[in-house]
Image (cartoon, rainbow, N blue to C red):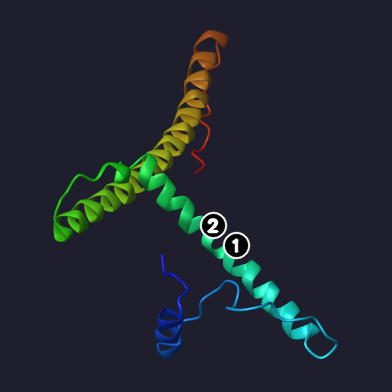
Amino acid sequence: MIYRTRANRAYCKELKIRLSGPALGRPRKTTVENAAELKVQKKLARQDELDRIPVEGKFGNAKRKGTLDRIMAKLAHTSESVINIGLIVLNLDTWLREVLLALHQEFQNFGSWLGRVLRAFWGSLFSGQSSMRIPSHQS
């Protein structure tokens, strides 16, 4: 978190980093001349808040699920390593979930096709029909 001190604001301005949040000092009075500008600033601040929601949610998830809230390392570079490993594990978990979901859906499609084939086979055996029509496999 970057505190909005004068020094930090000057540093961010020098690097062309836009900080969102209220300006220092008394809020500007709304007049006819600056009403449109204040409306644009308010809309931009709201969009910044909306952009931060998913990022903060991922950090909350990493703390809750990825055990980033229980880092016990003493040294800075050790803590960084633990954090990086935790984020890698979360990414692998997400990737594995997507792969397993895709496999599950593929096997459901295959199982549905196999069921139609078996029903056609058993139906032809007990109905006395000599020719069996096997349904085509659709992905």
Q: Which residue is mark 2?
A: 53
Query: What residue appears at the point 53 percent right and 21 percent down from the top-left corner?
Result: 120
Q: Where residue 2 appears, x then y in whole percent?
A: 42, 69
Q: Amino acid at mark 2?
A: Ile
Measured along the vertical axis of the image, is residue 57 above or below residue 36? above
Give the tally of numbered discs.
Answer: 2
Mark 2 Cα shell of 10 Å, populated few (<14), some (14-19), many (≥20): few
Q: In terms of secondary structure, where does tag 2 sit? A: helix
The kind of residue tagged 1 is Leu
Closest to the observer, 60 or 6: 6
Whether residue 59 sits left or right of residue 123 in the image: it is: left
Q: Cβ–Cβ below 8 Å for labels 1 and 2?
A: yes
Pointer 1 local density, CA inside 10 Å: few below 14, some 14–19, many at least 20 = few
| Disc number placed over residue 50 in the picture, else none | 1
Residue, x 48% and y 25% (percent of image)?
Answer: 117
Q: Residue furthest front?
A: 26
Q: Is residue 115 visible?
A: yes
Q: In the displayed structure, would residue 97 be above or below residue 117?
A: below
User: Picture coordinates of residue 137 (x, y %)?
Assistant: 49, 38
Tell me the SS state at disc 1.
helix
Q: Residue at x 49, y 14 (%)?
A: 122
